[in-house]
Image (tube, rainbow, N blue to C red):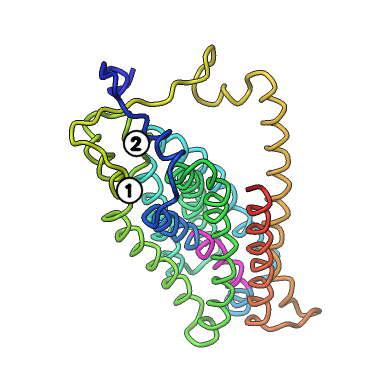
Amino acid sequence: MTDANRSTNAGAIDATELLDRSPWTAYQKLLILATALTIVLDGVDNQLLPNAVPTLIQEWGRPRREFTDALAIGPFGMMLGGLLGGVLGDRWGRRPALLGSVLIFGAFTAALAFVNSIEALAAVRFLAGLGLGGAMPNAATLASEYVPARSRPLAVTLTIVAIPLGGALAGELAAIVIPAWGWRMLFATGGLTSMALAALLWLWLPESPSFLARHRTRWPQLIHVLRRAGHEIPDDAAFVIREQIPGTRGGLTRLFVGSMARDTIGIWVAFFFGLMTYYVVVLLLPALLTAPDVGFSQPTASRALAMWNYGGVVAAVLGAVAMQ
């Protein structure tokens, strides 16, 4: 039982319900923007390597096929990072899990500037993938909890759409930086920018309201967040959390209760094949376009990948509007 559940105050506040029924204030929109920025950099750092591979092939003199493992291992790290990130977010809070993930992928992306072999490239890329995968579930959860229920589909989509937006920025950045300063500067720029943002947001981004409500010692922080969102909350306010669905256990098992099992499996299958298509294009497009029998330059291939991502941004926003 959590600290919040021990409260006997009849006038205790359900912070989640309060936010769900309230207007979407300017402060809450700033929180969504800050959360989305972390995912923009997730998208940037995730797509720097595919944009750099054509240059690495020429500089290292290694066959194109030998870079396949280094490209493919990143999504495996992201898969593991997504699982760990969700668990750590539940236990320690969404804010430290999100910003810790940004710090991890930023540090290892910057470390790619110092590698000199495909084997080292693959190892560092896997470690960066842990952070890249851990950021998304925590960012999406934070975004969903910061806003009213009626605005949640748009808020979450605006956060998730930051991935292709970051990918587009990675393509544009690679088209400029690699010809002028080289691929090492590309990784250093992307990684150090992510680390700087993580440090900045640590000083400003608040914790998830539902997580704060579970811990009595953190209620003053929750009061501060709710006041910034436009609510009049007394200094001695007590909070409760929403109860679980009666007759069910928490965690992963809730996804397979009754008819939810069919929906869960269907969503997983659809998401898997959607992401598979996405990563096939993201990881291979620049290398394929710069192959000798195709003949495009690295800047042109990077901008082609950027255009793919711009299309994803438009489609995601239109989808969110349609759902809302």
Between residue 313 and residue 125, name the one nearer to us: 313
Residue 175, position in %: x, y?
A: 58, 81
Drawn side of residue 65 relative to residue 15, left or right: right
Amino acid type at mark 1: Gly
Pair 2/1: label in front: 1
173 relative to 144, above or below = below
The residue at 47%/62% (across/down) is 41
Drawn side of residue 124 relative to residue 221, left or right: right
Label disc, if present, on residue 92 of the rendered structure: 2
Between residue 94 and residue 175, name the one nearer to us: 94
Residue 283 visible to an observer of this rendering:
no
The residues tagged by marks 2 and 1 sit, at their Cα atoms, a distance apart of 27 Å
Residue 62, position in %: x, y?
A: 64, 71
Number of numbered discs on residues: 2
Amino acid type at mark 2: Trp
Q: Which residues are magenta?
A: 42-53
Between residue 304 and residue 203, name the one nearer to us: 203
25 relative to 170, above or below = above
Residue 5, position in %: x, y?
A: 32, 19
Between residue 20 and residue 180, name the one nearer to us: 20
Q: Disc 1 marks which residue?
A: 230
